[in-house]
Amino acid sequence: MNYVVAIIGRPNVGKSTFFNVLAGDEVAIVLDTPGVTRDRNYTDVEWNRKRFTLIDTAGIEPKTNDSILKHMRKQAEIAIETADLVLFMVDAKQGLIDADFQIGTSLKKSKKKVVLVVNKVDNMKDTSDIYEFYNLGLGDPVAISSANRAGIGDLLDTIVEHIPEEAAVEEGTETKIAVIGKPNAGKSSLVNKLLGEDRMVVSELAGTTRDSIDTPITHHDKTYILIDTAGVRKRGKIELGIEKYSYIRTIKAIERSDVCVILIDGQEGITAQDTKVAGIVHEKYKGAILAVNKWDLVEKDNHTTKKYEDELKEAFKYMDYAKILFISALTGQRIHKIFDLVDEVCENRKRRITTGVLNDVLYEAMQLNAPPYQKGKQLRIYYMTQASDSPPTFVLFVNDRKLMHFSYLRYIENKIRERFDFSGTALKFVIKEKGESQ
């Protein structure tokens, strides 16, 4: 059993700052702008040998007519339903206000276990500011200052007191899937369809998903982590502040993923920005699936699919190993094939080839096409070995690395791919001169 703790409260009471302290990284965007954390964010926390999943949520505005704020409130409500324990965070500097009472009343109706957290208490020796929060009727408040890292240990002690011993979980080995692409390609819609619930904010407003959101999902008894990312815009259109942070967050999401689903708008067609996004995946040596979305809206004849596949192979020449899938996030058409492809790609990423067999392929390749000359000197490749997997990494020992032209290295890669199934994953090559350590 995985124990789930959700942080809820009004906007700007410090939920994301607290979340980031426990996550050990700036996982959630923190800016003094209401609504910056629009979706839920997840991280695993361990304290006193007990583990729990912490959910950060958007601020709750109990009364609002704004569509985005309403959607944010719905996200928080789903988090409360999911949670075993709720941290209700309030602001010591602002004091107790009517919105806090309204949220507190909702929590009482939910029958969930609640820990009342009073944030922004600057002087931990004088916590008189917290007394008025007893009026919420939610038990003893816990005083903290997320910004100053004060009182965090006491709060964690309180949290783990609620966690049963059997809630300990094993180290996560889930496959991480990053869903990436241009804004409004349908990333959040795809994640929502896979999850079967509106877990991401879906809006026609470009850039609605500003953070990278981690969401666990089980399919056929296997657990995956879906990472929904902010849309990657053209560099010239990246504004300072939130947009810049979101772009960086997308890059980080790619880095920590195992497989990236690169979503392409089937109606709009392949754009230069699609190839740039895919280029990042290729450069990071990740598994890759090119998913053409909105396929239900594309006018088709008997040749449409083949023609589109040819266009994909032409546009993404540098990653012709990528899997291709035509889907509709709106109707659910073929979306569950994503998991089958992810499993296949992950299996290929873990494939290991013995040094003897690998060198048989290498020597055969060199006999068919001899290594190139440059300025009268010929490249000599002594042997090749696989150093690691995920991604499959091969080390070639040569007489002079400057003689290894990228075209010949690509030739060797193609020969390896012809012999072994590495479809869906990039291969990494390291060139070393004889005598250098592996």
Image (cartoon, rainbow, N blue to C red):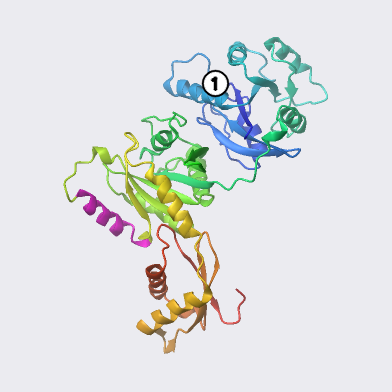
Quadrant location of the C terminus in the rendered image: bottom right
Say if 392 sits above or below 260 in the image.
below
In this picture, residue 436 sits left or right of residue 158? left
In the image, what residue occupies the spot 51% across and 49% down?
257
Decide whether residue 314 is among the magenta residues. yes
The residue type indicated by label 1 comes to: Ile
Instruction: Name the spot of residue 121 as percent of width and height, x first.
Output: 73, 24
In this picture, residue 425 sits left or right of residue 47? left
The answer to whether residue 94 is visible is yes
The answer to whether residue 285 is visible is no
Element carrying mark 1 = loop
Instruction: Name the spot of residue 132 as percent of width and height, x first.
Output: 73, 12
Which residue is identified by label 1?
A: 60
Name the residue furthest bottom.
Answer: 376
Instruction: Name the spot of residue 52 as percent of width and height, x first.
Output: 65, 35
Name the residue furthest right.
Answer: 125
Decide whether residue 79 is among the magenta residues. no
The stretch of residues the image draws in magenta is: 304-318
Looking at this view, is 198 or 276 the one in front? 198
Crowding around mark 1 (Cα neighbors within 10 Å: few <14, some 14 to 19, many 20+) is: many
Instruction: Name the spot of residue 284 as percent of width and height, x first.
Output: 49, 57
